[in-house]
Image (cartoon, helix red, strand yellow):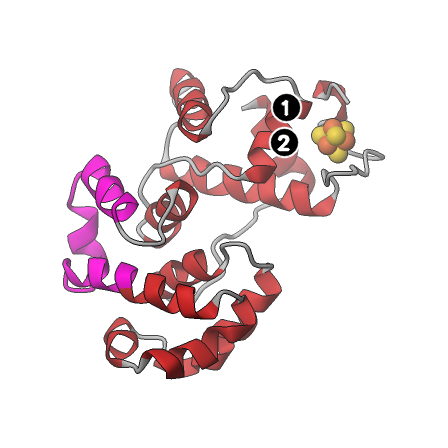
Amino acid sequence: MELYNCLLDHYGEPGWWPARSPYEVIVGAVLTQNCAWGNVVKAIANIGDRLDPRTILDMDASELAGMVRPAGFFNQKVVYLKAVTRWYQLYGFDVDTVRREPLTKLRGELLSTRGVGRETADSILLYAFRLPTFVVDAYTVRLCERLRLDAGKNYEEIKNKFETNLAETGHNNEGIYNRYHALVVTHGNARCHKKPACGGCPVKEMCGV
Ligand code: SF4
């Protein structure tokens, strides 16, 4: 919570995930794999008002590929988008129906879906469905190393470390997880790059660099 509070005080409320609907979060989470966010925004703008799960399922793959082209790996991402949309279809494209299911079941299903890895699955569950699962990404790993947090060696270990640690102070809820990941990404984009810009860093006193 010390790290969280420092980041929140410095960067403010992140207001994630910027999207008009839960389905747009799902699409964004798939498209952002190996892709800068600005190009995801272009791809989503190309889809425009056809960004609806039924429309995407019915759409010709080559037409959809043309729309998501700015996000790179577009043929592959069309396959992934259709697969994750079919998963959403199991719940009638209804957010409340998804939310009634156990989190571990949903996470297992998503991880069995083509093109959905851990970061994508947790991003979908947290930001589209507002379920409490901590998201880990490359910025999280780097920050943990630099702050010498000894958070673990792989995705699941780091995720469990954050969730367990936050649970000890009663802060293991969706709202904190939402902001925490967003703040880590904001910090990584703003200054904690591979070559960090450490001047004025809000967590400099905690950092081993
Ligand atoms: S002091 Fe530098 S390396 Fe450490 S967290 Fe801040 S920006 Fe990253």
Q: State the extent of the magenta-drawn residues as a range.
A: 83-112
Tell me: is circle 2 under 8 Å from ligand 1.
Answer: yes
Q: Main secondary structure of the magenta part?
A: helix
Q: Secondary structure at mark 2?
A: helix
Which residue was labeled with disc 1?
Answer: 145
Q: Are marks 1 and 2 in contact (CB under 8 Å)?
A: yes
Foreground pick, 137 / 129: 137
Q: Secondary structure at mark 1?
A: helix
Give left or right: position of 202 versus 101.
Answer: right
Give residue 208's position: percent from left, percent from top: 74, 18
* Residue at (24% x, 80% y) in the render: 58
The numbered mark at residue 142 is: 2
Q: Amino acid at mark 1?
A: Glu
* Residue at (17% x, 38% y) in the render: 102
Give residue 85's position: percent from left, percent from top: 26, 64
Q: Is residue 35 magenta?
A: no
